[in-house]
Amino acid sequence: MPGGSIYVQPNEKYTGSSPQWWYEKFWREDAPNRRKARYVKAAVGLVLGVALGLRFGLTAGAALTGLLGAGLVALGDWYLDWRAFHATAVWRGARRGEAITGRILRRSLRRHGYHVLDGRAIRGQASIDHLVIGPGGVWIIDNESWSPDTEIACYVGRLFLGEKYGSKVAKPLVDQADAFAELLAKETGVPVSITPMLAVHCGVLPRHGGGVVRAEGLTLLRPRTAARLIKASGRDMFTTEQIELIARTAARELQRV
């Protein structure tokens, strides 16, 4: 059953006749058709495997190569179907986006001297999911998920989410980055600028440009790409002492939510 929201269970947005509910319903109802198509593909793999065996003179082993071909094709087709459905898990409410991104950030960055603080906010203001502090700078990262067919793109500097402008998504995160940077700089005496990112868990990012969209001051990308870009920033913006100072100050001054 389609369940609760990305972050709080349950939520009416993910029940009843929501797009998530219908997506999962149609996916399950279409399972027999997918199996039939997989059988056809496996049969083609069987024929190709037998032909390949005969081509290389494996007359006695042609049946085995045919079965191997059928099995590989069926397994590959199942994996692609599973991967497509799994990619919608956050959008459907089956997984928590901030938990996925937080785990990726910690595994990828902590051993390189980065601090990852989850769920932070300036008192009385909206929260962000992750604050990353390290040698290459400071980042705030939020999580979002759109329907699987939503194209995320930048046109003439404007962010588009499908056919809609994305300014209402970009501006709050950019403003949060500025507010966080101002607070940390004031409390530490260290000049701090913060790069805002949005980890996209479901939606169509462009293949060109490494699947990264930069628009209206915001960078949108997959969680693993976010960790990779941060790690590859290659700048020694802060010393070890400054990193520790900023991290301690953030842990003290920013409210945990």
Image (spheres, rainbow, N blue to C red):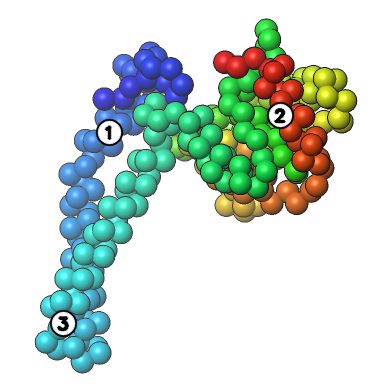
Q: Measuring 21% from the left and 42% from the top, which residue is drawn there?
A: 31
Q: Quadrant of the N terminus?
A: top left
User: What SS does tag 3 mark?
Assistant: helix
* SS class, disc 1: helix
Image quadrant where residue 86 sits: top left
Secondary element at tag 2: helix
**Residue lying furthest top:** 124
Vertical comparison of 248 with 88: above or below: above
Q: Amino acid at mark 1?
A: Phe
Disc 3 or disc 2, which is closer to the eye? 2
Q: Which mark is residue 244?
A: none
- Nearer to me, 120 or 96: 120
Q: Residue 207 at what x, y percent from top left?
A: 57, 52
Dot 3 corresponds to which residue? Answer: 62
Q: Nearer the viewer, residue 157 or 106?
A: 106
Q: Which residue is mark 1?
A: 26
